[in-house]
Amino acid sequence: MRSLAVIALAAASSSTVTTPTAAQAASPSDPSVPDYYDAVRLDEAGFDAEIPDGDMGSNMIRFTSTWGDGDGNGASYRLADVTALLPYTFGSSGSSTAASSNGLMGGGDGEEGEVATASDAVVRPRSSVQDHAAALLLACHHFNNGMIADVLGPIENDVLAKAYESTDVRLTASLYDTQFSPIESTRLLTKVLDGSPTRDKPLPQAILGAYRSACTSPTAILSGVNGIPQISYHSSGTDFDNKEQYPYFGRTVPSSGADARAVVDYLKTLGVTYLGVIFVTDAFGSAYQKSLQDAAGEADPPIRTDSVSFSYKSASGGSNGYFSVDVSPNGEPSSGGGQGGQEIRNAIQSLKNTEYRYFVAIVGEEHYSRVMAEAAEQGIAGGEYVWLFTGGVDRRTFQDRIARYQKDDNLAVSTKGIGLIQVEGGQTSDVDYANPSQRVGTPPPADADTGYQRFRAAWRSAMSDSSLVQYFRSKQLEIDPPVGGHDFTTIEFSPDPSQHAYFVYDAIVSLGLSMSYSTAVGGANGTGLDFPTGKDIYDSLRQNVTFEGASGTVKIDPNSGTRVRESVTYTVWNAREVELEGEEEGDKVGFDLVPTSHYVARKGTEADIVQEASKETMEASAAALADAGEVAEELDVPEFVTEWIPVEGDDRQFVYADGTTVAPAQLPAVDEQMNHIGKSGRIAGLVLMGIVVLIALLAMGWTAVQRRSRVVRASRPLFLAFVSVGCLIMASAIIPLSQEETTTGGDKARLDAACMAAPWLYVIGFAIAFSALFTKTWTLNKVYRNPDVDCVVVTWKDLVRTLGALLVINVALLLSWTLVSPLEWERFDKDSKDQFDRTTETYATCTSEKSLPFVIVIIVVNLGALLVANFQAYQARDIQTEYQESRYVAISMASILQAWCMGIPIMIVVKDAPQAKFFVEAGIIFVTCTAVLLLVFTPKLLAVRSDRRKEEEERRRNRLRDVNARAGRGQFDDEEDENGGIDLSGHHNDKKEQFPNDNIDKDEDDILNKDKLDAADDMNGGEGGDEENPQGGSFKGGGAAVPQDSSAQATYGGGNTTIGTASSPDDALSGADEFRTEEEEGTPDAAEETRPSGESPAEESSPEGIKDAENLVGSNGTA
C-alpha cells in the first residue's frame, strides 16, 4: 500500500506541479527530490489541508490529494512537523560575537570554527551538528519511505510493527540554531509556537533537542506547557526526570546519573579514591556534578571528591547567555581574559590546592582550551596528572577543532594522555558480553549484524547518493537564524557518522513509531486517533516503543521517559599525539582518539550474586543449583550487570601523559616517616657492642695468659671463661637487633631471621655467663650453710651442671617458640595522618601472634634464677673472700637485675619508636655485659698487679736478708771483695757485686736494718724456728707460724677442695678458712681464702717455705 501511494503521489505531483513557486524555490520541495513531503505543504492545487482545531491538542495536518477518483484511490497523509533545536554555532550567528565565539576551539589554519577576522563574520558550523541534521533528515526519509527496517531490523512488537506498516503519518523537519544559548533557544521556540498553524507554517507536533541541557531546560518547560512531546539526543540532566516540571520530556540517552555511574566505575578500575572535579554551573554541569558526587560516595571504597566550578559566561557575555571569549589577533582564544578567565583561573588554582592527580572535567567543548591551558600554566596537566572529560566535549568536535596545537603550546602538553568518556551507540541485547570474543570492539565488530552496523551502512549509502546529499545540504539553508553567510551547498559529510547521530536517528524513529501507534490503536477504544495529541504520542513513546535501533536497544523508562542505562555503551577514548602532514608538519602537533575500554551491560547470572549467597546455598548440591529459576528467585539475580571491558590489543591500552600505560599515583607521594633506627643509631649500638666484645676478648686473653697465676687459679679459669664467652654472645645480639629494611634491602626473609636470632643470642649468652655467677654464689653459700662439715668439695662439673640446666630450659623454650610462632618483621601504622587520611608515620618491629606466652615463660625462668642468685649473694654478703670476689659477684648480679627492671618497662613504652627501642635494648645488653665483665675482672686485674708488686718487694727483701745473713756468718772475705763484692766494713771495692735489681743504696740499707730488727723480734718471741730447727714451728722466709696442735685438715693432691673448719659456726665465719679446687690430674690449684672482715691475706711463702702450700690462720690461732 505504502509503495503504491508513493508512486501515485509522485505521478500526480509531476502532473500538477509543473513549476515551483517562489516558496518552493526557497525550499527543496521539487518532486524530483526523493523526500519531497515538504512540497505537499505548499502544493495548494494538488492537496487539500485539514488543520485541526487548536482545542484538539494536535498539530498534525491531514493532506488529501485533489486528484483522486472519490473512491479512496487518492493520496491522504497526516504530516507531522518536527522542530529541531540544533547547536550549529556558538553565540549570536549574526554578529561579530559569533565570530569570536566560534574561534573558541582554537582551530588551526583552515580548521573548522576558525575565524579569519572578526569583521568577516563568516562562521563555519560544527561538523558534528551537520551530522545530527543529516541523521534527522535520513531518519525522516527512511520512516516516510518504509525503509527503517534497513536499520532496525524486524520490530518485535507486532502491534507496533503493524501500526507502522499501515500508517499514513509522514514526518517533516524544521531546523533552528540554538547557538548554545538558553536565551536564544527560548526565543526561537517561543516564535515557533506563536500564532496559529497554517499549511506552510505548521506548529510542531514534536520537538527534537536541545543539545545542551541549559537550552533544554527552558524549552522543555515551554513544550510541556503547550502539550508537545520533546525528545533529546544529548541532554542528560537528572532534573528532566521530574515529570511535574517536564511532563512531556523524553530522551534517547541516559541521564547524567547513569553517566556518572559509568565514570565512577571506570575510576574504580584505576583504584582512584581521590578525585578533583571542575564543572560549569549550568543545567548540565550542576546536575552531572551532583550525580557524580553521589555515585562516588556510594562506591566501595568511597571516592572522595572535591569540586570547583565556574559560570558558563564571562563578563563580556552580558545577560543573553552567550559564552564569549577574548580572541587574539590571529583568531585563537586567549586563556586569561575577562571575568570568565579569572573564574577558570581560580577554579584551577583550587584544584591544584587539593594535590590530587585525577580530575574529571564536566565542561563543554567550548571551555576545553581555556581550562586546559590554565591547567598547564599552573602545572596540573601532563606528566603525572590524568584528566577525563565527560560527554560535554563532543568527540568529533575534539578531533576537528581542538586537537591541533603548536608543539610548544601549553595545550599540546596538557592534551596528551587525556581521556574522553562518551556514551556510544551499538549496544545490542543479544550479544553475549560474558564471552571475551564478543567483547572486543564494542560497539560490535564490523561484521556483526546489528542496528549499529546497519545504520553505518545506511549512512554510507546515503552519503554516496548525490541527490540525497543535495537534499541534506539544501534543507539546511532553512536554518533559522541563518548561519553567518555560510554556504551549505558545498558541505561534505563524514563517511562515519558522529557519535550522537545514532541517537538522533533513533529519536526521530521513536517519535514516528509513537505517532503511528497512536493513530492505529490509540484512544480509549483502541481504534486509533485521527489527530493524536502530544500526550497520546508521549505515552506511546514511554510505554510501547522498544526496538533495536542504531544506538542499540532503545528502551525508555515508562516513569521518567529517559533511556535505561543498560541499553547503551560507554567508551573511553584516549588522546594520542600524531604527526600532522602537509603544511602543518613540523609546526603543529595533532591528537587522535583511540578507544581503550567499553562499558557494557549483560544479563545477570547466579555467578554475579555468588558472594551474596548464604552459606547453605554455597554448600547445596549441584542438583539443587541446577534449578535456575528457584535459585534465581532465592538469590535475586540482577537483571543487568554493567562492567568496563578493555579493548584487546597492545595498541589499545590507555597511554597516559607520561607516555606509559601504568596509571599514575592518585596522590603525591606520602612524606612517610619510617622511624628507622638510622645510621647514627645503628653506629651507636654497634659501638656499644664493640666495647663489650673488646672487653670480653681482652678478658679471655688475659685469663689465658694469667691462667697459672695465683689470682686466676683461685677464681677458676673456667669460671672466667664462661663469663667472657657469655657476655660475648649476649653482645652479638645487638647485630640482629640493628637490622631493618635499609640494611637488608627489604629482604623480609633476612629480617624474619634476624628477629629470632636476637632472643637466641641474648638468652643463650645470658645462660652461659649467669651459670658461672650462680655457681660462684652457690659455692659461697655452701660454706655459709655448712659450718660443721669438715670438707666441702666443688668440682668443675658443678659449674657445667648449672650451665646445662639453664641451657636446656632456655633452648627448649626458644626452640618451641621458633617452631610454633616465630617472630616476623612487620611494619605498623602510627596515628599520624595527613590531609588525605594517609598514615605519615610507621614503625617496624618483630612480632608474632602467639609469642607472648613464650616471652613470659623465658622471662620468668631467667628472672627467677636471677632473683635466687641475688638472694644467695645477699646471704653471702658477710663472707669475706680473697680479693673480695663475693662482693663483686653480688654487685654484678644486682646490676643485671636493675638493668632488666628499668629497661624492660622503657622498652614497652618506646615500642613504636624503633631508634629509642634499639638504644634501650643495646643499653640493657651493654650494661649487663660490662657490669659482669668489669666487676668480675677488674678486681682480679688489680690483685694481680698488687701481687706482682708484693712479689717484687718480697724478692728484694729476701735478697737483702740473704746478703745480711751471709754478712753475719762472715761469708764475705777478702777474696770476694777482690771480685767486686761488698766490704762489710762499709768500704766498696773497685768491682761491685751485680744484683738483679740494683746496687744496695740507702733505702736498701734501711730495709736491711729493719729486717734485722724483725729477725731479732722473731728470735726473742719464739714464734718460729729456723731452717735448722723445723720443730720450733717457724718457716724461713717469713712464713706464718703454724701451731703443732692445729685441728685443721689439708689435702694437697687428691683433686678435691678442702675447706678448713673450726669448732663452731662463728669460728667458721670468722676464721681464715681456705677452699681450693685442684685439677683432676692432682695438681694443686690456687686457693681462694675466706677470712674474717678486716684481715689481710697471708703472705706468700718464700722459696724456702713449704712447697705449693698456703697457710691459713684463723682468729683463734688454728690453721
Image (cartoon, rainbow, N blue to C red):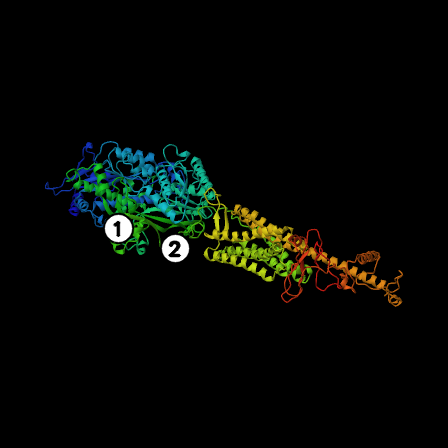
Can residue 29 be seen in the rendering of this structure? no
Find numbered disc 2 in the image and state the secondary structure of the residue it sits on: helix
Question: Residue 647: x, y in percent?
Answer: 35, 53
Question: Residue 112: x, y in percent?
Answer: 37, 44
| Alpha carbon separation for disc pair 1 and 2 | 42 Å
Q: Which residue is mark 1?
A: 631
Residue drawn where x is 41% and y is 34% of the image: 316
Total marks in image: 2
The quadrant where residue 101 appears: top left
Question: Residue 565: x, y in percent?
Answer: 30, 45
Find numbered disc 1 in the image and state the secondary structure of the residue it sits on: helix
Image quadrant occupied by the C terminus = bottom right
Q: Residue type at mark 1: give it.
A: Val
878 or 131: nearer the eye?
878
Horizontally, residue 1028 falls left or right of residue 134, namely right
708 or 1071: nearer the eye?
1071
Horizontally, residue 18 falls left or right of residue 654, namely left
Upstream in sequence: badge 1 or badge 2: 1
Question: Residue 346: x, y in percent?
Answer: 45, 37
Determine which of the numbered discs, if any, sits on residue 651 in the image. Answer: 2
Can residue 1108 be seen in the rendering of this structure? yes
Q: Give the crowd class for mark 2: few <14, some 14-19, many >=20 residues within 10 Å.
A: few
970 or 57: nearer the eye?
970
- Whether pointer 1 and pointer 2 mark residues with C-beta atoms closer than 8 Å, the reply is no
373 or 1082: nearer the eye?
1082
Q: Residue type at mark 2: give it.
A: Asp
Horizontally, residue 171 falls left or right of residue 237, namely left
Is residue 471 placed above or below 799 in the rendered structure? Answer: above
